[in-house]
Image (tube, rainbow, N blue to C red):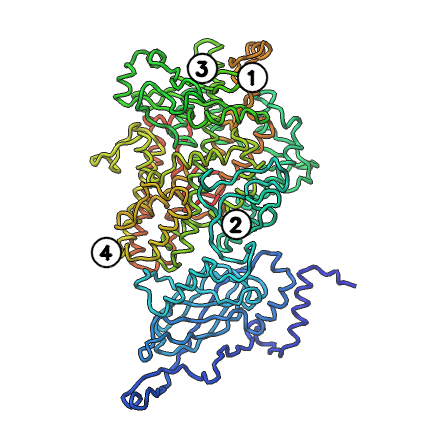
Amino acid sequence: MFSKKSPSLQTLSTAQSLSSLFPKPSALINPILTGRRDNPCRRQNFRGRCKITASQSNIAQKGKLLKEKVKKIKVKGFITAEEGTLLESLSWSRPLDVVTDIRGRSLLVELISAETDTGTLMEKDPVEDYAQRVWFESRNEKYECVFDMPEDFGTVGAIRIQNQHHREMFIKEMELELPSGSVTFTCNSWVTPKSIDPTKRIFFSNKSYLPSATPEPLKRLRREELESLQGNNRERLGEFAKYERVYDYDVYNDVGDPEKDEKLARPVMGGLSHPYPRRCKTGRKPSDKDPSSEKRKGNFYVPRDEEFSTTKGTAFTGKAILAALPSVFPQIEAALLDPNLPFPHFKSIEDLFDVGIDIPKEAGLLPMIPKLIKVVAEAQDNLLQFDPPILLNKDRFSWIRDNEFARQTLAGLNPYSIQLVTEWPLKSKLDPAVYGDPKSLITWDIVEKEIRGVMSVDEALKTKRLFMLDYHDLLLPYVNKVRELDDTTLYASRTLFFLSDDSTLRPVAIELTRPPDVNRPQWRQVFKPGYDATSCWLWKLAKTHVVAHDAGYHQLISHWLRTHCCMEPYIIAANRQLSTMHPIYRLLHPHFRYTMEINARARQSLVNAGGIIETCFWPGKYSLELSSDVYAKLWRFDREGLPADLISRGLAVEDETAEHGLRLTIPDYPFANDGLMLWDALKEWITEYVKHYYPDEALIMLDEELQGWWSEVRNIGHGDKKDEPWWPVLKTQDDLIGVVTTIAWVASGHHAAVNFGQYGYGGYFPNRPTTTRIRMPVEEPTEEELKEFYEEPEKVLLKTFPSQKQATQVMVTLDLLSTHSPDEEYLGEEPESSWADDPAIFAAYKRFKGRLQHLEEVIDERNVNVSLKNRAGAGVVKYELLKPLSKPGVTGMGVPYSVSI
């Protein structure tokens, strides 16, 4: 009969029985300290490391060597590690690992000298010892080893570790107590058991080296580590295993799922037909039904160290639950009375925050979202109750007003789309034979009437007073295709704004267009702010369509494509081409953390066929195809930095006399005002860092790792755009500073600006509907549709909004995406170990930290200055998205180093 003991008791019992096989220590001694320290040296005659010298007599005797014994010293090393998950600690292998710990053979550790032997000019022999566990608390463990190190061993440049356990271990750091002082090796890496992979893991010291300056004994290890990460030494074929650390490229051929349903087949993103950045290769088999697609079964591989830390994984934060969302949503749907119908009235929308929805106790993973699920005392059900977003708390009616509609283009969730009007009349660049008359219906007369004779259109153009949200040419080719999908509609749109003297925008006109098809001619109409009831309702509906266009563009382009998707090739190339001891790798590494993991989870449940984006946003199954079009036509690396982006949209011009070297076209542009301060802080820090390691620009051209990284980014990672003339070439310090600052900005400031305000602005979905489901009531209406509009216009607006199911799914998703985890790593909060160990770099970092603290103070001052009407005033949501630090949760502020949610 099997014992009914708990798993933890079984583990203890087994460990005790196995430990009886070994000599019992004295009762007066802590048993975990009594393990026999075996000599790990494999050399038969290794009783002391020998210094080998050559004398004249040796040469005369045809190279016979004379050996002189070298004195040794004791060097202690302490390794800080972390167990795997709770389930791993209760696995079958745990008792065996306890025995390994008792024997004092938990880890095999080698010390590698950074100096060559002066006699032989060859690498010095490594010094080895087994590490034994001496302390543990919760899941943290400490291991000790004592090395017999030759006095002339020199600087320890690297360590190699082999995991003797049967489970993987997360090695945080190793500290060596040397006579000259302690030296720390920062690892932060998972080490696989030797039973799975006997290769010893290499970790370099915190001292950074360019390839040409690398100590000779470390050059081979530097090459070997890169070859391992490139997969050159990989013996197994097929799908990558969880423990592997291989970085390679593939196209987006795993978002469709033809194996499950032919309707879920999707074109491959990447290549001539659909240009796209590359993702991490998984090695999975091709689909049986569509060989161009990859099977989706199993885990979505990312290299082991790219996965979320154990803290993130076990805390079940928003990052970890993201992959579980598909199993959560059916529980929400079951709790709704009419999930596919619109909300019957606005009160039912507000009830989501005020009353909540009853859900059963047995609701799967849904109760794991503590922020949204309230436990009702003495009730059998839980309550799904959303926290009111800040927009609703500040002013529940602001979303209706035109001034708020305009303000959010500058200080809302998507400040990347507003652009200056530079040509008149407005005109489409698409083929008129396919898409109809290219001339816009927004005329001079309409504009001059709406700006009430303040100035002529010609004057407005010259003085840079006209701005536009232009989703016309981008969306027009998709209109008829999207309209064929269930329960959705689409227009192409242009929205014109006039800049007032107080730096606020006023919406002037909206043009909605439907292209011709085989049965119908082109349809289009201009809508203006109205003064009668019918005009006002038509204007509200037109704004709803425009905001939905902006919400889809924001999520797919400003957020997914330009940050998540375009960052991944930089990360893959850096790990393949830049050694972990390379200074540029160490500068960029904080900006890469967890991006590949969150992107893999997005391919699982957000951007996949039938995922959240396709089911809740207007592009539907054409979502990634649309982002591919934008990537092909509009994405340019040289415009991803903030100053270049602002200039390209006409929102700034270069001016050496102005702050930041730019003069903003709209002085009160909160995103740009705060963003330029953050950009300058990043650039100054990166400039000091780059010039410290590259005092001479010739070093940049001679750095084969750096050039290999940038070449691989251009030619493979973003290979579909490799022939574009705008790619920077790394020749000078300024070239490198520009490239690195751009990447750092995209990962930090850009992503923070478009991500962490999602629940604040989109949590109340009438403010940012993600799709529209019915046409404008004036587009070829039936008598019944026209009658409903005139008699119940509010009902028409509610039917235009997303369904109950779509709205609540988006609200849950935005809440998770907007949440900072407890272990978030913010810009300037803590230095990397390699930065802190170099006095010059640490001094530069402290100056960077000081500039970020100053930015926080400036943002606070700006947010109480009521003359800045786009960020301050009665009921106005303060612009805090670029404040560097934040508390955990949904805060609407905080700039993490990386794209990690």
Label 2 sits on a secondary structure element that is helix
Left or right of residue 695, residue 209 in this image: right
Label 4 sits on a secondary structure element that is loop
**Badge 2 amino acid:** Lys
Which circle, 3 or 1, is nearer the viewer? 3
Tag 3: Cα neighbours inside 10 Å, few (<14), some, or many (≥20)?
Answer: some
Report how far apart the C-alphas of labels 1 and 4 lie in the structure.
Answer: 66 Å
To which quarter of the image does residue 773 belong?
Answer: top right
Tag 1: Cα neighbours inside 10 Å, few (<14), some, or many (≥20)?
Answer: many
> Which quadrant of the figure contains the N terminus?
bottom right
Read off the residue under disc 3.
525
Closer to the chain start, of discs 4 and 3, is 3
Read off the residue under disc 4.
696
Report how far apart the C-alphas of labels 3 and 1 lie in the structure.
Answer: 18 Å
| Callout 1 touching callout 2 (CB < 8 Å) | no
**Badge 3 amino acid:** Gln
**Badge 4 amino acid:** Asp
Read off the residue under disc 1.
796
**Badge 1 amino acid:** Val
